[in-house]
């Protein structure tokens, strides 16, 4: 859209989302059940949320994880970047990070009404196709064991548990 009078252009850019894939010692995935005011209420997803204006995407991922589950983590590799179209009114691009270490007992918080561990071959009803795609790829790869990779020195992607 643009203004004919002044030439100002409004770009409908997508929002940015961030998610953290946390796996326990058995390779299970930490998921949260979405609350009644969320998109896809009652369904499950990888802990996630939107990046605030001026916020680093890694900081947003860690913040959302802690807000939704009470778990604190250290981030490793980017596992997936995908466009999301599950909400046509608010298109987004999501970035999924791997947690290489975590602390805390999962408990629901923020807009999550439950949190739990799930085996890759026994997943609940998932809210987002993008989560399903990533978890399917993990299951197909046989990557059931938590990563031991460490983030690069000096990066702003850690919150000490």
Image (cartoon, helix red, strand yellow):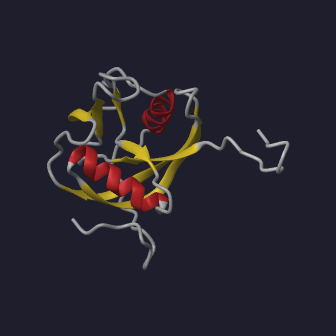
- Left or right: 73 as drawn, with respect to 82: left
44 sits left or right of 86 in the view: left
Foreground: 4 or 85? Answer: 4
Q: Is residue 114 above or below residue 5?
A: above
Q: Nearer the viewer, residue 68 or 122?
A: 68
Q: What x and y, as percent, mark residue 81?
A: 57, 46
Residue 154 figure quarter? bottom left
Residue at the image point whose x is 48% and y is 36% from the top: 134
Q: Residue furthest front?
A: 5
Q: In this figure, what is the number of numbered marks?
A: 0
Residue appearing at x 44%, y 52% in the figure: 97
For residue 120, what is the image quadrant?
top left
Regarding residue 117, the answer to whether it shows in the image is no
Residue 5 in the image: state x and y as whole percent.
84, 46
Q: Is residue 30 left or right of residue 147?
A: left
Q: Is residue 13 visible?
A: yes
Q: What's the residue at 32%, 25% (across, down)?
A: 123
């Amino acid at each position: 859209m643009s203004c004919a009078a002044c030439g100002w252009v409004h770009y409908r850019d997508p929002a940015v989302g961030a998610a953290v894939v946390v796996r326990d010692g058995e390779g299970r995935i930490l998921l949260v059940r979405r609350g009644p005011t969320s998109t896809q209420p009652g369904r499950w997803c990888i802990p996630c949320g939107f990046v605030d204006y001026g916020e680093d995407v890694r900081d947003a991922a860690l913040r959302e994880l802690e807000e939704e589950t009470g778990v604190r983590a250290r981030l490793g590799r980017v596992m997936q970047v995908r466009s999301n179209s599950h909400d046509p009114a608010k298109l987004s691009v999501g970035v999924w990070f791997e947690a290489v270490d975590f602390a805390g007992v999962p408990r629901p918080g923020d807009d999550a009404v439950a949190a739990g561990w799930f085996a890759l071959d026994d997943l609940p009803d998932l809210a987002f196709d993008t989560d399903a795609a990533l978890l399917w790829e993990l299951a197909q790869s046989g990557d059931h064991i938590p990563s031991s990779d460490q983030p690069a020195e000096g990066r702003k992607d850690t919150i000490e548990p």
